Every structure is written in C-alpha cells, then in structure tokens.
Amino acid sequence: MSFVSPSFLIFLIVALLCFFIAPRKFRWGLLLLFSYVFYWFVGGLFALSAITFTILTVYASGLWAGKLREKKAKPALRRLPLALCLVANFGLLAFFKFSNIVLPSLGLLLIPGISFYTFQAAGYLIDIYTGKAKPERNILKTALFLSFFPQLVQGPISRNSDIASDLYAGHSWDWERARSGVQRIIWGYFMKLVIANYAAPIVNAVFSEYWEYGGAVIIFGVLAYCIQIYADFAGGINIALGIAKIVGVNPPENFRQPFFASSLPDFWRRWHITLGTWLRDYLFYPIILSKPMNKLGKFLRKTLGSKVGKLLPPCLATFCVYLVVGIWHDLSWNFVVFGLLNGIVISISLFAEPLMVKLRKKTGIDGSKPGFGRVFAALRTFAILGIFRYFARASSLGTALVMIRQTVRHPRIYELWNGVLLNLGLDYSGFFVLLFGVIVLLVRDFITERGKDCGTVLNESKPVLQFVILLIALASILFFGIYSGEAHSANFIYAGL
C-alpha cells in the first residue's frame, strides 16, 4: 500500500476520522493500531514480526540501560544492553538489506523501511545510554514511536524528544493545522506524480540501454535522475510530514532546497537531513572524540605539523561516515565508490579552504553571497553531484565507468535535437509536463531559499488566487499524474531501504 495508491487514501481517511472522533486519551492508541495495520498492508506479517522484534529488544534494553545508569554501574556493564541490542538489530538490518539473492529463494521479501526505524531505534537507545533521554516505561508508546505510520517506510528519522509529546497528546482537530498539512500532502503528490514519475522513464531508458546513446543523452539521463530522486524522496517525505501535521505531530524536516547548495558539504546539510544528523551525532562525533583518534591527532600534529595533523582526523572520520552512507544505500562497489568520492571531495575541500578564500577574494566570486557567485557555486556543486550520480544509479561499478567513458569520448550532442530524446519513454506532451513540474519545483525552492514560507505566502494571498493555485495543483495531479498514460507509477525509491 503505497502513499500514492487509492487504497492508502481510503486508509488515511478512515484513520483520521477514527482518530478525531475517539476520546482524546485513546487517540495515541489508535495511531499505534493504524500504524500496525498500515505496515501489515505494506510488508505483511513477516515485516510486522521484524519491527516487533526491534520494539521488544529496544524497550527491554532501554529499561536495562536506564537502571544501570541510575545505579552508576561500571561503563563496561552499562554498555552491555546497548551493544547486545545494536548488534541484534543492525545484524537483522544487514541480513535483510544485503541478502537480495537469498531471500527470494527462501520465499521471503525485503522489509520496507527497515533501515529507517532501525536507525531511529538505535538513536533512542544511545540517548538513554548517554543520559540524554530517559527510557519509556510504556511499551506501547515505544511501539508507536518506532512504527508511526507516516514516517515508517521512508522517514524522516526522528528522535523521541522531537515527537514523543505530540505523539501521545491526542491533539484535537485544528483547521489551520489541517490546511497546512493538506497543502504539504498536495505538494508531495505533485512532486512524486508530476515530476518524479515523468522523469522515471527517461532515467530507466538511459541507464538500461546506455550503449545506445552518446554522452549528451547520457548527461540528460543523469540530470533526469537528479530530478527524479529529489522529487521522489522529498515528495514522499512531504506527504508523511503533511499527514503528521494534521494529527499534531511535527517530525524534523528532511530537505532544505538541495539544488541551491553552494558546496558538497552544504548539499549534505540540505539532503536527507535527519540521516545526516544521525550520522553526525552517533558516528562522526564518537569517532572524532574517541581516545584512539585523539592519540592519532597528537601523533600527526607532531610528525606532519599542526595544520595537516589537525585536519587529517576529521577527514578520516568523514571517510567513515560517507562509506556508511554508500553502504546504507546498497552493499555494492558502485555505492562504496559513491560514498568514498563524497569523502574524498569533502576532505580535499577542508585542505583547500585557505586557497579557496584567497581565490574568492581575487575573483570576487563568492558562493556565500547572492549574485553570480552564488549561481556559479550551485551549478558547480550540481555538476559534481551529477558525476557521483553515475555511480548511484548505474547497475554496477563497471557500468558507471563505461557510461562516464561514453560521455567523455562520444558526446554526440546532435542527439539532443535529432529525435533521439523521443525514444526515452515520453512524447512532446510528457516532456512539457516534466518541464512544467521542474519549473514549479525550482520556483518554490527559490522562494523558500529567500526565507519565505510558501504555505504562509499562499495563505496570505487573495482567496481567488489560493483557489486557482489549488485547482491547478489538483488538476495536474489528476490529469498528468493519475489518469495520464505518460505517467509511470513507480514505487518510491527510498521505500525499500
């Protein structure tokens, strides 16, 4: 049951009606019930068993860790429940993510969203271990935190402190909150159905038959993939955040105009923000602040000088983080390279920062200020990411390298206007719809980048204008996204991670 299926809309309406009709003290329990029903439709009883295992182990380990901390037990003993639970759940995650060949032969399916709720569970348990959070005594509330259906399948990854009070509050109906949530849901459907699904056939055609095309068409396919993955992932997140908003829950934002990033580190601060925050707090900082890294830093400063010795430990920790990012997507060489390339470029940028400061002063091109410099920095970052996307989308490392070689050696620019593009799964009307969607996306992100909330701007506009914009959005979703033969109803890309 995908967010874009008619059955989900029926499920959502029933769930919301039951939630707001029920007495306030029962509402959070209904959220848990409907979360389990939703996950049963999405992944079946096998998936329900897996998430129940996570809930039970995290709940028990959290109580155990909390008691050991209260008793001021020795550090080694306090780490025991944390270690056992993390090994069990990340072991389960690794098995289901990286056994793609074995599982189907056993009649088993991959578990939707397992990495999202596992990361969320791990963060909750680590916070208890470090004393940043107290263990939840009610197992059903722990279950709701980990299985809240809007964010269960593809995030965002929340902390218990972010959403717990709202999850269990049983908020009453609020028209303003509902309007804001519905607007967000509509925008999410627009991103998925009118942008991502129209970019999908182009991406599939280019990456599945790359040998048929020259470099120009391959670049066009990579560009379409950059658009597709953003609109697909952010579209699903917007639907999730909109649903959560209606019931009074406010998970953290997961995207912040990534196409306007001025550098690669800036991009990762804008893209999949909750995963980046998780990796920063629970992987990067523990590595960089560990005793072995501290000793290594002192040794490097003595042997290589203070400047190089100071930068190498953060670079090493950065490599570890982005290697995990690559493996998180898939345990294959192309994703390992994807992660390492990010680590390499970001590490180089740390060493090159003094040189870049001088260069910015001489040229006057400054990506941190509005104007040409800002546009140049955004385009440069997008180009670097485009190269990395070869590895993220290609079926293998060898395929990615062949596509890059094809791009460089045989550009065949004339294929952009000799009709080849019409062999990529869209006709003229389909390309027009995609272009229209991308322009709307960029305009909306530009307005947001300028510090204005699009929902607020819309709500403060004249009622006639609000009605026209809403009508255009709904008509686009219905006629271009649902009833059009051009639309390809692909599943959400990140839903299976």
Image (cartoon, helix red, strand yellow):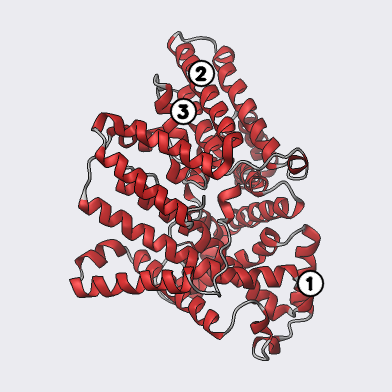
Q: CA distance from mark 1 to mark 3?
A: 47 Å
Three-letter code for the amino acid on which mark 1 is drawn: Arg
| First-in-chain label (2 vs 3) | 2
Q: Position of residue 365 (x, y in %)?
A: 48, 73
Label 2 close to label 3 by CB (< 8 Å): no
As drawn, 286 above or below 69: below
Secondary structure, mark 1, is helix
Q: Are marks 1 and 3 in contact (CB under 8 Å)?
A: no
Label 2, label 3: how far apart the Cα atoms are: 15 Å
Going 36% across and 37% down the picture, which residue do you hit? 163
Read off the residue under disc 3.
127
- Label disc, if present, on residue 60 of the rendered structure: 2
**In this picture, is 75 found above or below 198?**
above
Q: Mark 1 or mark 3, which has the lower sequence index? A: 3
Residue under label 1, please give it.
Answer: 405
Task: Return the x and y of residue 380 as percentages of the image width and height.
Answer: 56, 70
Is 84 drawn above or below residue 433 in the view shown? above
* Secondary structure found at label 3: helix
In space, the residues marked 2 and 1 are separated at their CA atoms by: 53 Å
Name the element at disc 2: helix
Q: Position of residue 369 (x, y in %)?
A: 40, 68
Depth check: 400 or 269 in front? 400
- The answer to whether any part of residue 351 appears in the image is yes
- Can residue 381 be seen here? The reply is no
What is the number of the mark on residue 42?
none
Q: Residue, x 64% and y 57% (percent of image)?
A: 345
The answer to which of 92 and 400 lies nearer the viewer is 92
| Label pair 2/1, CB-CB below 8 angstroms | no
Circle 2: residue type: Ala
Q: Residues within 10 Å of mark 1 (few under 14, many from 20)?
A: few
